[in-house]
Image: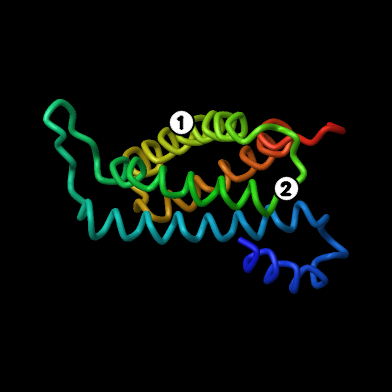
């Protein structure tokens, strides 16, 4: 994590006039997590789920939703670690509580993603990966506000 922080610190002077350090870290780490999410989603959707319905025996899941379910725990882990150790380092909230709160936000984001993907892919017939990218815009804004003021809150807030 220190390597990532040092790389981000090296480029921060370029953005110092426009962004606070915390917002810069959030956007940079969010970009890392988002690109990881999109890359993993693309790989899972195209090469693991193979764009096919997934039959679990008791329920059949569409390929876009199956890929979303598989990628979520991976990006949860990446996102939490980046948030805890780079973006919101000064939080007084205990780690187990941060994880729980982060998971609640993830659940809300998952619900937003699920509904968005259903609408964009199945009702609007937009391809899965671009639909995932569109959905990310909404979940990123929601996530930042919730993480800053809830999961990784600082004492003076």
Tell me if mark 1 has few (under 14), some (14-19) or many (20+) residues whose alpha carbon lies within 10 angstroms of its own.
Answer: few
User: Which residue is under mark 1?
Assistant: 111
- Of pointers 1 and 2, the one earlier in the residue sequence: 2
Residue 3 figure quarter: bottom right
Residue at 62% x, 57% y: name it: 29
Answer left or right for 120 relative to 64: right
Residue 72 figure quarter: top left
Quadrant of the drawing holding the N terminus: bottom right
User: Which residue is under mark 2?
Assistant: 89
Tell me if mark 2 has few (under 14), some (14-19) or many (20+) residues whose alpha carbon lies within 10 angstroms of its own.
Answer: some
Quadrant of the drawing holding the C terminus: top right
> Residue 17 location, x and y as percent?
88, 64
| Nearer to me, 136 or 88 | 88
Residue 69 figure quarter: top left
Mark 1 or 2: in front is: 2
Residue at 33% x, 45% y: name it: 70
Answer left or right for 141 relative to 49: right
């Amino acid at each position: 994590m220190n390597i990532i922080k040092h790389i981000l610190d090296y480029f921060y002077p370029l953005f110092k006039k426009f962004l606070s350090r915390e917002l810069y870290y959030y956007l940079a780490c969010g970009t890392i997590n988002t690109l990881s999410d999109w890359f993993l989603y693309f790989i899972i959707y195209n090469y693991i789920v193979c764009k096919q319905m997934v039959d679990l025996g008791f329920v059949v899941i569409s390929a876009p939703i199956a890929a979303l379910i598989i990628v979520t725990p991976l990006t949860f882990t990446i996102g939490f670690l980046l948030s805890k150790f780079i973006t919101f380092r000064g939080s007084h909230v205990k780690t187990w509580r941060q994880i729980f709160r982060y998971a609640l936000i993830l659940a809300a984001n998952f619900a937003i993603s699920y509904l968005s993907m259903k609408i964009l892919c199945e009702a609007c017939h937009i391809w899965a990966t671009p639909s995932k990218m569109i959905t990310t815009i909404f979940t990123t804004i929601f996530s930042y506000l919730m993480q800053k003021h809830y999961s990784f809150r600082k004492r003076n807030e």
